[in-house]
Each structure stands twice: as C-alpha cells, then as structure tokens.
C-alpha cells in the first residue's frame, strides 16, 4: 500500500497550494500516467477521473493562502502533503514524495524521489490529481475575481496577471508573502476582500 505524493501550485501568486496522495494497485490499468506538466489539459482531465475510479485510495488536500503567508510556501506545501497522506481512506504503508524533502508528521515511513512524478506511476497520478484540482479552484476564483484572469494563467506571474495586480491591487486570494503581491499592495483602487 505505497502511496505517491505530489503538489501543485507552489509558484503562483494566488490560490491555495494543493497536494494529492494516491495508492495504485499493481494492475491499475491506467494508461498514460506522466508528470502532469507534460500532459495536455484535456488528457489530465481524462486521467483525473480514471485515477479516482481505479486507484485503491486517493486524497486531495490543500494549504490555503493564510497558511502560505504564515508558514511560507515550502512549509505550507509540506503541510498539504501531510494532510493528503493522512486523508487516505486506506492507510499507506509507505509514501513516495516527489522532490527532495519529506513532510513531517506522516503516519508511515516515507522517502523523497527527485523527479518522482516522471519515475513513479503513483506520484504521476498524484501530480495529475493535484494539478487538475488546483486548476479547477482557479477557474472558480476567476468567477469571483474576474479582473485578474485567473482562469487563463492559474495565478502564475504572467505579464497579464502582474498588470492586473498593478491596476487593481491584490484580492484576498493573493499570497501577500510573495514579492510581486507585496509590491502591488498600494496599487489599484479595488481591494476585493
């Protein structure tokens, strides 16, 4: 019962950081698992549903903007990963973590695997769940805060996003601990709180 664990959303200026944990059976039958960053959005969406249907267990967890600003993005990411592993309906006997760090407080032994999202199918599956869930959150935030274009850039610091920050100032879903958001704190008239 080995779970793969990965995150999505460390680099954006807005929104929660997401993590997922997935336990795949030996004969899971899911074709095309890969690092979510190399898959098209349509392929990720298809695999998202298939992973949820065929995995032995899966969990998606977050650390929100307040936690990111209080803890910093690294520690908030580790917290989201820990929550994802704890949230599995079937406890994992080991966790394979994408990257070079292991979160504290896991209920099982764990090891970090650099580039694990390209090497371990369970980590690839977790990468896909985290990415699709996070993208969906940013599409929802776009409906609430349309001036920022979240549906397009998913919160990443694109020229369009940075221009919107300068024009409108940050909303409550922006990460104030990130330099471009801090720089825009006095800008703009609208504070969407």
Image (tube, rainbow, N blue to C red):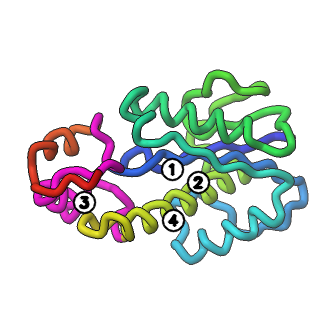
Please name the residue that numbered disc 3 is placed on. 158
> Is disc 1 surrounded by few (<14), some (14 to 19) or many (20+) residues within 10 Å?
many
Label 3 Cα neighbours within 10 Å, binned few <14 / some 14-19 / many ≥20: some
Dot placed on the residue nearer the N-terminal end, 2 or 4: 2
Residue 70 pos. (x, y %): 39, 28
Say which residue appears at 9% left-offset and 49% top-offset.
187
Q: Quadrant of the N terminus?
A: top right
Residue shown at the point (11%, 60%) measured from the top left: 167
* Closest to the observer, 141 or 46: 141
The Cα atoms of the two marked residues, 1 and 4, are separated by 12 Å
Cβ–Cβ below 8 Å for labels 1 and 4?
A: no
Task: Kindly indicate the quadrant of the structure image that contains residue 97.
Answer: top right
Sequence order check, earlier mark of 1 and 4: 1
Secondary structure, mark 2, is helix
For residue 8, which numbered disc appears in the image?
A: 1
Q: Which residue is mark 4?
A: 136
| Residues at marks 2 and 3 touching, judged by CB atoms closer than 8 Å | no
Identify the mark nearer the N-term, 4 or 3: 4
């Amino acid at each position: 019962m080995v779970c793969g664990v990965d995150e999505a959303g460390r680099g954006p200026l807005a929104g929660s950081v997401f993590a997922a944990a997935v336990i795949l059976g030996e004969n899971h039958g899911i074709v095309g698992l890969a690092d979510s960053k190399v898959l098209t959005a349509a392929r990720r969406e298809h695999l998202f549903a298939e992973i949820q249907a065929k995995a032995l267990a899966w969990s998606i967890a977050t650390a929100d903007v307040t936690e990111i600003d209080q803890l910093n993005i690294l520690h908030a990411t580790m917290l989201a990963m820990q929550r994802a592993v704890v949230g599995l309906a079937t406890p994992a006997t080991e966790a394979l973590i994408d990257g070079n760090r292991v979160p504290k407080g896991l209920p099982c032994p764990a090891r970090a695997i650099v580039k694990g999202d390209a090497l371990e199918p369970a980590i690839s599956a977790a990468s896909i769940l985290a990415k699709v869930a996070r993208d969906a959150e940013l599409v929802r935030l776009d409906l609430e805060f349309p001036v920022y274009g979240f549906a397009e850039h998913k919160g990443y610091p694109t020229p369009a996003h940075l221009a919107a920050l300068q024009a409108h100032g940050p909303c409550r879903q922006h990460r104030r601990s990130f330099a471009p958001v801090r720089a825009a704190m006095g800008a703009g008239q609208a504070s969407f709180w």
